[in-house]
Amino acid sequence: MQDKLFYVFSEVKGPKFRYYYSLFVWVFIWNLIWLAYIGGQPVAEPNLTFGQLATVIYFSFFFFAVPFTSYLENIIFLRLNTKK
């Protein structure tokens, strides 16, 4: 049995060669810093809305960004490596 996560289907191994995935990882890291800052602020209207938006972005990384980038990079990888 393969030791892969159930939602990672990329043919390209390693994040160094996965351009779109690395962009999403940097967005994820920025979002973690943003969530940490918002979590330390008092509960008020702008902070509450920004915290909810950051939470949606955080969970969308796992549910949408990782599978989408795997699918997109597979399409690009297969088009570059097929012989015409």
Image (cartoon, grey):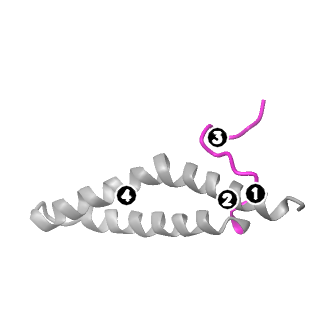
* Residue at figure coordinates x 84%, y 61% from the top left: 81
Q: Is residue 31 magenta?
A: no
- Please state which amino acid type lies under the numbered disc 2: Glu
Using a 10 Å C-alpha cutoff, classify the residue at mark 3 as few (fewer than 14 neighbours), some (14 to 19) or many (20 or more). few
Q: Is residue 7 magenta?
A: yes
* Residue that label 2 marks: 73
* Residue at figure coordinates x 51%, y 69% from the top left: 26
Q: Main secondary structure of the magenta part?
A: loop
Place of residue 4 in the rendered image (x, y in percent of width and height, measured from the top left): 70, 40
Which residue ends up furthest to the front in the rendered image? Answer: 84
Q: Quadrant of residue 84?
A: bottom right
Region of the chain picked out in magenta, as a range:
1-16
Q: Comparing marks 2 and 4, which lies closer to the viewer?
A: 2
Q: Comparing marks 1 and 3, which lies closer to the viewer?
A: 1
* Residue that label 4 marks: 57
* Residue at figure coordinates x 17%, y 60% from the top left: 48
* Residue that label 1 marks: 12
In whole angstroms, how far apart are the C-alphas of marks 1 and 2?
7 Å
- Please state which amino acid type lies under the numbered disc 3: Leu
- Please state which amino acid type lies under the numbered disc 1: Val
Tell me whether the residue at label 1 lies in contact with that at label 2, contact meaning CB atoms closer than 8 angstroms. yes
Left or right, residue 69 beside residue 46? right
Is residue 80 shown above or below 2?
A: below
The first of marks 4 and 3 along the sequence is: 3
- Please state which amino acid type lies under the numbered disc 4: Ile
Secondary structure category for the residue under label 1: loop
